[in-house]
């Protein structure tokens, strides 16, 4: 393309695409990046400049860009059967459902959706309906879902309600019965508490909330094993087991939102597998097809599924449908994606390369504004503060400077957006699980250089 053509297409984009989460006025000075190619962890823009995508799209391109195998599978499936209504079954969809149950080590069933939001939406409906038909005593009406501040669960109305990030919801709130509690946040725990005591304390908040709300009214608790977009908050090891115990005690269902942490991201196939607990429902998306196809899934254990089995006509069936749920092209691509994750040992690689990145990034703790470097596998967060004593968040302008500094080195970083008042100060690193050591070093030096720019 000539420079003129590049400028024209860029103008056409600004005039026609409504981009998410940004003020379009900014595009006058700073137009959106325009990429033309992806290969591994590298994106190439229309000028031929290469960038390291340190966020794997939006935490989704786990196997990296440019996999021709996936293109071939999509081509073959489109040629053979490009679409099928979800009340029928195709081979890739059957095989993927069975594979997901194996990976989750769960006996149950899988409901497919086109996105993570809709997987969470589906999970809430299942939780509500399960309780309605599970024979609880008179007076039980379990409708409330407990969720956590700082979590993002999606943008459809139920999932948005469960989201605990104010900015995403202002002006859009609807009346879905959700209650929010605090997540573990070891870096900002009370200084007299150990991480474990802190974990116990936040788990107690769940129990207290169930009691205060009336256990008869609480259907489920939804949580990401590691809060991702809300700042990479890694729970102390006793937190998930405590949550499981509390949910069991009050017959509250436990939903793990694995949309980000699933498919190897944290160094296990699913994030919850670090803590040896069993969920009732798992929701997933993103890494399930590494972003090559839009898709999500809800995996439900048989205790729940069996409560939906009855005579036809008595309304016990699951009354939900998505036109693109279990789309054969998406499931064929997802199956191949999972095959690649397994074949190339990317789950182990995420653990290994995640530790390497952690050890390299920890050296940045010498910088006066780096408060903490934390990670679980290849999900890393760097919390930037004004000083290490006060731990006050580094102001947005400074963080923008760090991001720009990294971009000068052609490293595209993520950061918590302005969704958490006064605490949008965490740089996020979540690259394709395939990155090489050289690329990891490039990533670290990009961050280093960004940080140098604010000294
Ligand atoms: C943890 C989590 N859950 C759910 C979602 C929603 O997924 P989707 O954008 O596919 O609807 C997201 C999206 O970023 C997410 O990060």
Image (cartoon, helix red, strand yellow):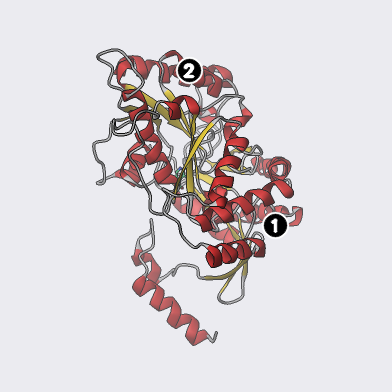
Name the residue nearer the viewer: 446 or 212.
212
> On screen, 401 above or below 113?
below
Name the residue nearer the viewer: 269 or 32.
269
- Say whether marks 2 and 1 touch (CB < 8 Å): no
> On screen, 30 above or below 381?
below
In the picture provided, is 195 more to the left or to the right than 149?
Answer: right
Which element type, helix, strand or loop, lies under badge 2?
helix
Q: How many marks?
A: 2
Query: What's the residue at 72%, 53% (across, down)?
Result: 441
Sequence-first disc among 2 and 1: 2
Which element type, helix, strand or loop, lies under badge 1?
helix
- Cα gap from disc 2 to disc 1, whole angstroms: 39 Å
- When asked about the image quadrant of residue 142, the answer is top left
Q: Is mark 1 within 8 Å of ligand 1?
A: no
Does any portion of residue 194 appear in the rendered image? no
- Circle 2: is it few (<14), some (14-19), or many (20+) Cα within 10 Å? some
* Residue 48, percent from left and from top: 61, 75
- When asked about the image quadrant of residue 317, the answer is top left
- Residue under label 2: 201
- Residue under label 1: 442
Check the picture and name the quadrant holding the N terminus: bottom right
> On screen, 225 above or below 191?
below
* Residue 235, percent from left and from top: 55, 28
Residue 193 numbered mark, or none: none
Query: What's the residue at 44%, 70% (across, down)?
Result: 31
* Residue 69, percent from left and from top: 66, 62
In the picture provided, is 317 more to the left or to the right than 351?
Answer: left
* Residue 277, percent from left and from top: 57, 24
- When asked about the image quadrant of residue 206, the answer is top left
Name the residue nearer the viewer: 452 or 311.
311
């Amino acid at each position: 393309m000539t420079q003129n053509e590049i400028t024209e297409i860029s103008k056409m984009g600004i005039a026609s695409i409504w981009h998410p989460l940004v003020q379009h006025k900014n595009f006058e000075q700073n137009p959106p990046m325009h990429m033309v190619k992806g290969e591994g962890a590298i994106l190439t823009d229309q000028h031929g400049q290469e960038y390291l995508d340190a966020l794997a799209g939006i935490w989704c391109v786990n196997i990296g860009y440019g996999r021709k195998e996936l293109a071939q599978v999509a081509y073959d499936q489109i040629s053979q059967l490009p679409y099928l209504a979800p009340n029928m079954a195709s081979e890739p969809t059957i095989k993927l459902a069975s594979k997901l149950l194996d990976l989750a080590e769960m006996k149950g069933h899988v409901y497919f959706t086109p996105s993570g939001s809709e997987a969470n939406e589906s999970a809430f409906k299942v939780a509500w309906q399960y309780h309605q038909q599970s024979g609880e005593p008179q007076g039980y009406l379990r409708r409330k879902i407990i969720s956590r501040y700082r979590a993002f669960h999606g943008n459809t109305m139920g999932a948005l309600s469960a989201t605990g990030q104010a900015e995403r919801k202002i002006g859009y709130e609807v009346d879905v019965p959700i209650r929010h509690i605090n997540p573990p946040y070891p870096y900002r725990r009370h200084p007299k508490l150990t991480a474990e005591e802190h974990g116990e304390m936040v788990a107690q908040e769940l129990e207290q909330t169930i009691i205060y709300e009336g256990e008869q009214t609480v259907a489920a608790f939804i949580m990401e094993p590691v809060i991702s977009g809300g700042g990479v908050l890694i729970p102390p090891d006793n937190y998930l087991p405590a949550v499981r115990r509390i949910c069991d005690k009050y017959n509250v269902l436990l939903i793990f939102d694995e949309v980000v942490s699933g498919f190897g991201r944290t160094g296990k196939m699913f994030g919850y597998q670090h803590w040896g607990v069993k969920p009732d429902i798992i929701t997933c998306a993103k890494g399930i097809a590494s972003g090559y196809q839009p898709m999500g899934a809800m995996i439900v254990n048989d205790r729940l599924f069996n409560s939906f089995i009855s005579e036809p006509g008595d309304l016990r069936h699951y009354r939900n449908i998505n036109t693109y749920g279990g789309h054969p092209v998406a499931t064929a691509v997802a199956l191949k994606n999972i095959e690649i994750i397994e074949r190339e040992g990317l789950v182990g690689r995420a653990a290994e390369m995640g530790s390497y990145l952690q050890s390299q990034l920890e050296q940045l703790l010498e910088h006066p504004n780096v408060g903490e470097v934390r990670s679980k596998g290849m999900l890393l967060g760097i919390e930037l503060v004004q000083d290490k004593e006060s731990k006050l968040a580094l102001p947005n302008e400074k963080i923008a400077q760090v991001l720009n500094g990294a971009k000068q080195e052609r490293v595209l970083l993520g950061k918590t957006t302005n969704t958490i008042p006064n605490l949008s100060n965490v740089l996020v690193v979540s690259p394709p699980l395939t990155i090489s050591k050289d690329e990891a070093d490039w990533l670290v030096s990009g961050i280093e250089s960004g940080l140098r720019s604010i000294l």
